[in-house]
Amino acid sequence: MTKKNIPHLETLIEQQKDKAEGLTFPCKYPVKAMGENSEKFLQEMLFIAQKHCPSTQECHVRTSVSKTGKYQSVTLTVEVDSREHLEGLYGEIKEHKDVKWTL
């Protein structure tokens, strides 16, 4: 079967460009970052999330402290409009000097 035989193939390809695997936009998405266990780290992650997703509030944040108490995991549930929007947010979080890893 060739490309010419598939009706609306170009339309289907265009629609897939705006979708990350398994996601339909807009959607709420949990972004997780691990860093030092400090209020400063938490506030900086919230600031970055609000910069990209202004509707993000403190009630959209969950934290978990490591067994040793040295690190914390910050989960921010944000609303994103597209794959590019999500990638922009992740990109800035990953670049932050205090982020050890993201998920």
Image (cartoon, rainbow, N blue to C red):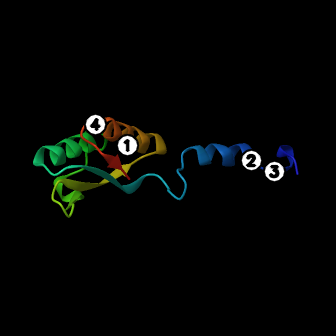
Q: Of circles 4 and 3, which is in front?
A: 4
Q: Secondary structure at mark 4?
A: loop
Q: Using a 10 Å C-alpha cutoff, classify the residue at mark 2 as few (fewer than 14 neighbours), some (14 to 19) or many (20 or more).
A: few
Contact (Cβ within 8 Å) of mark 2 with mark 3: yes
- Marks 2 and 1, the one that precedes in the sequence: 2
On screen, 45 above or below 65? above
Which residue occupies the foreground of this view, 61 or 7?
A: 61
The residue to which callout 1 is attached is: 90
x and y, in percent, of residue 86 in the image: 41, 45
Q: CA distance from mark 4 to mark 2?
A: 40 Å
Q: Residue at x 43, y 41 (%)?
A: 87
- Marks 1 and 3, the one that precedes in the sequence: 3
Q: Mark 1: which amino acid?
A: Tyr
The residue to which callout 4 is attached is: 96
The residue to which callout 2 is attached is: 9
Q: Mark 2: which amino acid?
A: Leu
Contact (Cβ within 8 Å) of mark 4 with mark 1: no
Q: Residue at x 27, y 51 (%)?
A: 34
Q: Using a 10 Å C-alpha cutoff, classify the residue at mark 1 as few (fewer than 14 neighbours), some (14 to 19) or many (20 or more).
A: some
On screen, 92 above or below 22? above
Q: CA distance from mark 4 to mark 3?
A: 45 Å
